[in-house]
Amino acid sequence: MANKSNLPRLQKEAYLGQTTVHWTHTVSKRQTGWLSDTFHAQFRETLLHSLVRYAMSCSAYCLMPDHMHVLVDGLKPESDQLLFARRLRGDLNRLLKPFALQRQGHDHVLKDHEREREAYRSMAHYILNNPVRAELCSKADTYPFSGCMFPGYFGLDPHVDGYWDTYWKLYGLSVG
């Protein structure tokens, strides 16, 4: 019998290897007041360590006042999205105190057609434009709490022209 207090998950195999997951982590009770430049810097450091540890990259993330989105690609056969999320959430909960993330994040494992480049780019665009839809800014590239991360490649910016060509080149080199 399924535990009704948990969101449904796919079989573990769906989270392994070169898979892509859109993770949404919500702060308990949708509390606000934790998002700051300092937290963003700590988030980036924590994200980097988790990406390296589990052989992943993050093509887009967006920290909103009460939740966060992270679009993550497994780069190697040994990549494990569930272990990545568990580690990231544990580290983020330590940083968020006295706030905390809800008990379980929401995940969307991308299907093959969603991983086609234009569909994938549209999903990342949707994530990065969250603050515009929430009227926190007028243009996504002015929002200070979004970005991307590909371990070993400092300074990537999903808001600049040419980003996607660079991302796909790095991705191809990493999984190849």
Image (cartoon, grey):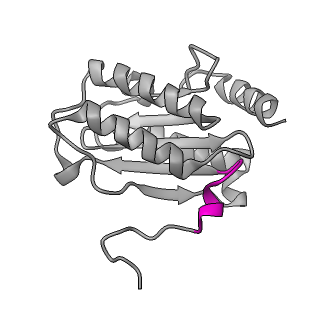
Residue 117: give x, y in percent of width and height: 72, 44
Q: Nearer the viewer, residue 136 or 138?
A: 136
x and y percent of residue 65 in the render? 25, 38
Camera-side residue: 145 or 118?
145
Residue 171 part of the magenta-drawn span: no
Give the image location of residue 116, x and y in percent: 73, 50
User: Can residue 17 be found in the magenta stretch?
Assistant: yes
Left or right, 8 with respect to 57, comes to left
Q: Residue at x 27, y 47 (%)?
A: 101
- Confirm whether residue 136 shows in the render: no
- Residue range in magenta is 11-19
Residue appearing at x 43%, y 28% in the figure = 46
User: Looking at the rendering, in which quadrant would you find the N terminus?
Assistant: bottom left
Q: Residue at x 52, y 43 (%)?
A: 84
Q: Residue at x 16, y 45 (%)?
A: 31
The reply to whether residue 119 is in sight is: yes
Please identify the quadrant where the C terminus is shown.
Answer: top right
